[in-house]
Image: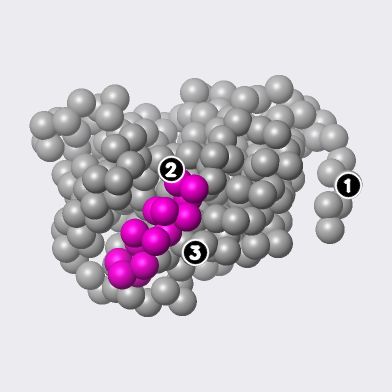
Amino acid sequence: MSGHIPAATAGELTASPARRAELAANLAEVRARIDAACAEAGREPGEVRLVAVTKTFPASDAAALAGLGQLDLGENRDQEAAPKAAALRAAGIGATWHYIGQLQRNKAKSVAAYAGLVQSVDRPQLVKALADAAGRLGREPLGVLLQLSLDGDTERGGVAGADLDALVDSVTSRPELALRGVMAVAPLGWAPDKAFEQVAALSERVRRTVPEAVEISAGMSGDFTRAIVFGATLVRIGAILLGSRSDLG
Ligand SMILES: *Cc1c(COP(=O)(O)O)cnc(C)c1O
């Protein structure tokens, strides 16, 4: 299970010059589009943080992005994220890892060891597993976002509105965790505005209980400009930064 992770060599972590140039150009363009969306929405660019979603791409891409100053990196599978995080750490790269995928309780211990923010917390059993793991690691409180299910189809992850208040209580009852806000994916077939308006309202509801839970993680490659209009503080962007993925990751 906790497989031996070979120390990364410098070679494995070095993207080709062409790839580095491509990532630099994509990153500059994405940052410019975020700034433009902020300007249009009357917000300060510093209010929106970019999370580069490196899933399915090699650790060398993650390292290249970090070298360009893009230190917030997102992953959705522990099997892939754990070795990537270990490789960057071994190379002395201090990235912040955002865990954005569905999470099974038996992976909580692994994720709590490298994640700076777990964005996909959606049920009390997972709260308990993460809090127990963070406590055993003796780490600083593990930041969490509550993943919202906007259409009530919780099969794909997320907490339904009716269960949100109880989930907030379960997180705030655990000092090993720090509730930072909410996360959502716009449901397939929904107009982005309808989704992000609902996210804003649910964020406000959480902040009535936990005022410091100000983060709103919303928006991906196809819809982040609309998410910024509705208050997103974190946008999770993969495809337009790293390229299209061959799988459905
Ligand atoms: C893959 C993924 C993203 C990034 O999506 P892109 O369309 O590649 O920008 C964002 N959020 C979650 C939860 C994801 O799984």
**Quarter the C terminus occupies:** bottom right
The spot of residue 164 in percent (x, y) is 35, 61
The disc, 1 or 3, on the residue closer to the chain's N-terminal end is 1
Colouring convention used in this rendered image of the protein: one colour
The spot of residue 65 in percent (x, y) is 53, 32
**Quarter the N terminus occupies:** bottom right
The residue that appears at 52% across and 29% down in the rendered structure is 71
Q: Three-letter amino acid code at disc 3?
A: Arg
Q: Three-letter amino acid code at disc 2?
A: Leu
Q: Is residue 241 magenta?
A: no
Q: Three-letter amino acid code at disc 1?
A: His
Q: What secondary structure is the magenta-colored segment mainly?
A: helix
Q: Which residue is mark 1?
A: 4
The spot of residue 125 in percent (x, y) is 57, 64
- Asked which secondary structure carries label 3, the reply is loop
Measure the alpha-carbon separation of dots 2 and 1: 32 Å
Q: Which residue is mark 2?
A: 179
Q: Which residues are magenta?
A: 160-173
Q: Which residue is mark 3?
A: 123
- Asked which secondary structure carries label 1, the reply is loop
The residue that appears at 29% across and 25% down in the rendered structure is 46
